[in-house]
Amino acid sequence: MSGPPQRTAFNKVKELLIKPPVLAYFDPKKPTIVEDSSSYGLGGCLLQEHKEGLRPIAFCSRSLSNTEQRYAQIEKECLASVWACERFDRHLMGLDSFTLYSDHKPLIPLINSKDLSETPLRCQRMLIRLLRYKPVAIHQPGKMMVTSDTLSRSPAACSQETSNLHEDVRFHVSMVTSSWPVSDGKLRQLKEETQQDVSLRTAINYTVMGWPTYKQDVMLAARDLFDFRNELSLYDGLLLRGDKIVIPYSMRKEILDRIHDGHLGITKCRERANQGVWWPGLSKQIQDCVAMCKLCMQKKSAQQSEPLLPSTLPDRPFQRIGVDLCELKGKHFLVSVDYFSRYIDILPLQSLTSGAVINKMKKIFSQHGIAETVISDNGPKFAAKEFQQFAEEWNFHHATSSPHYPQANGRRKEPCDQPKNFYAKMTHTWHCSLTELLHFLH
């Protein structure tokens, strides 16, 4: 049964439904974007404050493509923010600031901090596109964002503009993933092991559907990933944290051994890991692995020397380089280091003559250009008349230091110690070790 109050309310609702909202003129002083994302579409609304309250300036909505529907929830929300801003570009470009409402709380610090280092891979490119604007992101519960939520649940079809955004993000992801130091075969193995890993499968499901609000509500298998939930995303069957692959449990021992391959120290091993892999507790495991390595302990210097005095920095790459000769297990090689970029070249020598050294120097110059200054010790290979003639003919200045006090050119001597320590620990062949060292250093 319904009485007069119910009929009055029903008629009022009908009037509101059939009455179109009156759009206001844009005022560049107080613009606000309200946006939302659902599983099927995006919705956005540009509002401004007037005497009677918030008035709409423009609306937008579109459906998600099949690929976008597989995005992580935070990626969908980020896509909604960026797409809405670009749709309202003519209103927002050039504003000192505007308010951007989102009902996805983890997205707020990503937009406001401008730090992309641990941001999900697709979000990185989206947020780069957002840098042209100056939004101040504020969290607002979804129940208070009725207009944009309604638009996202009844979206329009995708447009060519949408396709361009998708291609931009796809190209960025492909560019980053192509730089991973991993073979295609190893990638396939990682995908297979990821699907078999209960912890990662659970985390993938949470990443797509949304994580619980509280850690105690997360299944035990994925609980150690809860604190990193806002940095996780999916790519081609792999779980990523930022731009690094989350390694399944069954392969962590193998990857840890490869990280420590060459018996590098803790800092260098962590730098190597940061090139593309991660799992919870990796940093501590690297520290323990290096500390417990018997060969590393045997080769560790018992007495730490004083830090070398740095030389003045050149104005450009390969303006000044240092060269030195090193020997290990009967193998001789020429080491060169650029004083500006610290780029290192290591070239094997077939003989210890000035002519052999000069030929390797010519190879370095052919790749990087002729240096203005070459610094070496005053050893016989560099003090020879043949090398002095080479310096005059190739028009570079040759500076020397005492052969018994190499610390005088600290930056030149430092990289020479690196291959010595590296090869002393390596058990591979000469060429394999040299290739791995150069790959890591470069």
Image: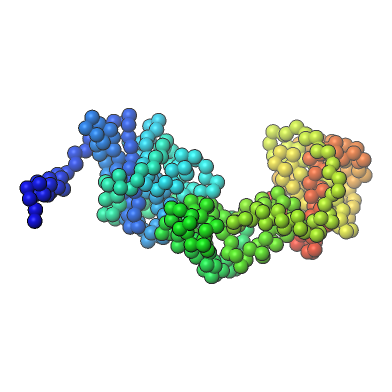
The front one of 6 and 399 is 6
Which residue occupies 38% across, 32% down?
A: 95
Q: Position of residue 415 (x, y in %)?
A: 79, 46
Tell me residue 249's x, y (percent).
60, 65
Q: At 83% from the left edge and 38% from the top edge, which residue is drawn? A: 306
Is residue 191 visible in this depiction of the protein?
no
Find residue 54 and report its image quarter.
top left
77 sits to left or right of 310: left
| Image position of 409 with respect to 424: above or below | above
Position in image of residue 233 (x %, y %): 48, 56
Q: Is residue 420 left or right of residue 5?
A: right
Residue occupying image coordinates x 76% and y 44%: 337
Asked where in the image residue 303 lies, by quadrant, the reply is: top right
Quadrant containing the N terminus in the rendered view: bottom left
Image point 48% across, 51% down: which residue? 230
**Residue 342: which quarter of the image?**
top right
Q: Is residue 411 visible?
A: yes
Q: Which one is in front, 146 or 35?
A: 146
Q: Is residue 326 above or below residue 206?
A: above
Q: Colour mode?
A: rainbow
Counting labels gives: 0
| Whole-percent x, y for residue 82 in the image | 39, 45
The foreground one among 253 and 116 is 253
